[in-house]
Image (cartoon, helix red, strand yellow):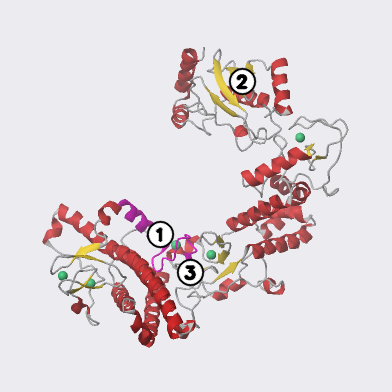
Amino acid sequence: MSLPKRIIKETERLMADPVPGISAVPHEDNLRYFDVTIEGPSQSPYEKGIFQLELFLPDDYPMTPPKIRFLTKIYHPNIDRLGRICLDVLKSNWSPALQIRTILLSIQALLGAPNPDDPLANDVAQDWKKDEKGAIETARQWTQQYAK
Amino acid sequence: MDSDDDFNSSQMSDEDIMGDQDSDVSVEDGLPPAQSMDQDDVGFESQDKDIMPSKHAFDVDFTVYSPQQIQAYQDKQIEDVSSILGQPPEATAILLRHLRWNKERLIDQYMEKTEDILESAGLGETAQTHPPRLEKVAGFVCDICCEDDANQDTFAMKCEHRFCVDCYKQYLSTKIKDEGEAARIRCPGDGCNRVVDSKSLDLLVGEDIKDRYQVLLTRTYVDDKENLRWCPAPNCIYALQCGVKDKDLLQIVPTVHCECGHDFCFGCSLNDHQPAPCALVKKWLKKCEDDSETANWISANTKECPKCNSTIEKNGGCNHMTCRKCRNEFCWMCMGVWSEHGTSWYNCNRFEEKSGTEARDAQAKSRQSLERYLHYYNRYANHEQSAKLDKDIYLKTEKKMTALQTTTGMSWIEVQFLDAASQALQQCRQTLKWTYAFAYYLARNNATEIFEDNQKDLEMAVENLSEMFEKPIDQLQGLKVEMLDKTAYCTKRRIILLDDTAENLKSGNWEFNVSLS
Ligand SMILES: [Zn+2]
Ligand SMILES: [Zn+2]
Ligand SMILES: [Zn+2]
Ligand SMILES: [Zn+2]
Ligand SMILES: [Zn+2]
Ligand SMILES: [Zn+2]
């Protein structure tokens, strides 16, 4: 199956005009599969961390959202142990007019603004609500330990 | 309890069932309900003609509607409100759905804060400029597929988020076919809350998607209305409307009868479970699930003859067992001697509470509570099982009767009494089954005695009728009159029992040993 024009254009733009702090590189043997890295935003517990993610564009993309998951271990109330992300634009608020670029920016923003009230990783969200300082410290430690 | 006449027809008929002001509308529009209420038995006039005209305490008013009728009602409401608001029908539909078809609230809010309600419903500003249309736009590039062919048709709603027609189509079909959305499909533009209206949809998609869209809208309509419910029978297309509300379910068990023949509870959608209220049914089923391991052994299909110990398998619905070996006649349920189960003394339905010494011991107590449960469970399960066996026997009998018909020239109508008897048996066993769940939770007071008598009488009537099915086929025709009598008697006993339980439930005379709420 040939690659839709939309995916080709998006890929070209991601390569030619990358977003600062984010990279997304397609696999040579599967152009719908991307290796992604996101830098933790400054002034967040994820600062200086480099996070690996995988991104896959399903057949009906962009009618359905891309599938994305963290490969690097991360301590965050909206990301679970398997790296799955709770983010509205990846679910009910997905629009086919959104792009890989905008989605990755949203994920980076989520690292800067964790939302324990809309949790995916329940225990982490509970820690976060009970003891925010301690949770932030744990997130910082995990970042140092795993996100290199 | 002050909800005395909540469920009576006087109140129901002027209440706005489908959302219309006057209930005559349906008739004027040539949309009579698919079935009128009060149809106790599905199809057979012999069943209880003499009792039919009066309304029973356990009856509720209801109406059956086809999807076409429901859609017609929606259209009619949309049309009415459309002319009041001065909004086109497709926008009015979105507004009505947004406020869950509460017409009065919509009109109030629209008059007060037009802009706000349009915004929150996903209609944006009012502007009824032009009907939706496809356009070709010079220099256009579609944000979804990245095509820039100047000749391609494009579409945008009033929010001006423009995409090529192919992408718009594919977007709508994904939403409707794959995701099952209809009432609130938003513009494909990022972050845009504008809802796609039916007129735009008509312009963009093919017939199959349009049909699916209508089906989904009707589904949402029924789901949105507290007084409408889909018939839960597999593949049934009808929806039923009934005025009984959730809060009423402690005082009434609203069994409704669908056009397809299925009887179910409007409160919880389970199969008819009169006389037990929904809350008890839920508790009972949960308990049976939890205790099924313990209970299974006792409801097994074989037992030993109390006299000679040879194994006996129950193969008919009747509880009157005769041991093949020693000819001992006994009752399957209590294993007692059958002769003692005569008309005056039939002590099989009530669990005699054991008193005194044993109960003081904690172990004995828990064993007794299990025994008590098993007593009721056993009878509950027995009627369920017997109903199946009754049906099996009937089906076999029917086959033989059909054969007999051809040889003796008996007419089809002449063998219908068997069918009527079979149906009455099914219905009565269904009721009996639930009387045992009901009885399990019932705390003893002065109303319980009558209930137990009624239960006993119905059980007797049912067993007597059930027994007739086991008669040899060549005798059946001669038993026609007797069978008709027994059928009518069963039905009558069932009505007496249900009338009594329903009246006491309504007036709060039952005391339960669990909390219902
Ligand atoms: Zn397009
Ligand atoms: Zn829009
Ligand atoms: Zn039905
Ligand atoms: Zn119910
Ligand atoms: Zn025997
Ligand atoms: Zn007995």
> What is the distance, in whole Å, between disc 1 and disc 2 at their CAs?
59 Å
- Disc 1 under 8 Å from ligand 4? The reply is no
The segment highlighted magenta reads B261-290
Question: The C terminus of chain B appears in which quarter of the rendering?
Answer: bottom left
| Residue at x-position 36% and y-position 68% | B387
| Residue at x-position 61% and y-position 69% | B15
Residue sitting nearer the eye, B342 or B221: B342
Q: Quadrant of residue B124?
A: top right
- Residue B201 vertical placement versus A36 (above, below): below
In the rendered structure, the residue with mark 1 lies on which chain? Answer: B
Percent of width and height locating residue B264: 47, 65
SS for callout 3: loop
State the residue position of label 1: B279
Question: The N terminus of chain B appears in which quarter of the rendering?
Answer: bottom left
Magenta stretch contains residue B262: yes
Percent of width and height locating residue B204: 77, 46
**Does residue B402 appear left or right of residue B75 in this picture?**
left
Which amino acid lies under the numbered mark 1 shown in the image of this protein?
Ala
> What is the distance, in whole Å, between disc 3 and disc 1 at their CAs?
18 Å
Which amino acid lies under the numbered mark 3 shown in the image of this protein?
Ser
State the residue position of label 2: A29
Q: Given this view, does label 3 or label 1 mark the residue nearer the observer?
A: 1
State the residue position of label 3: B3
Which of marks 1 and 3 precedes in the sequence? 3
Asked if both marks, 1 and 2, belong to the same chain, the answer given is: no
SS for callout 1: helix
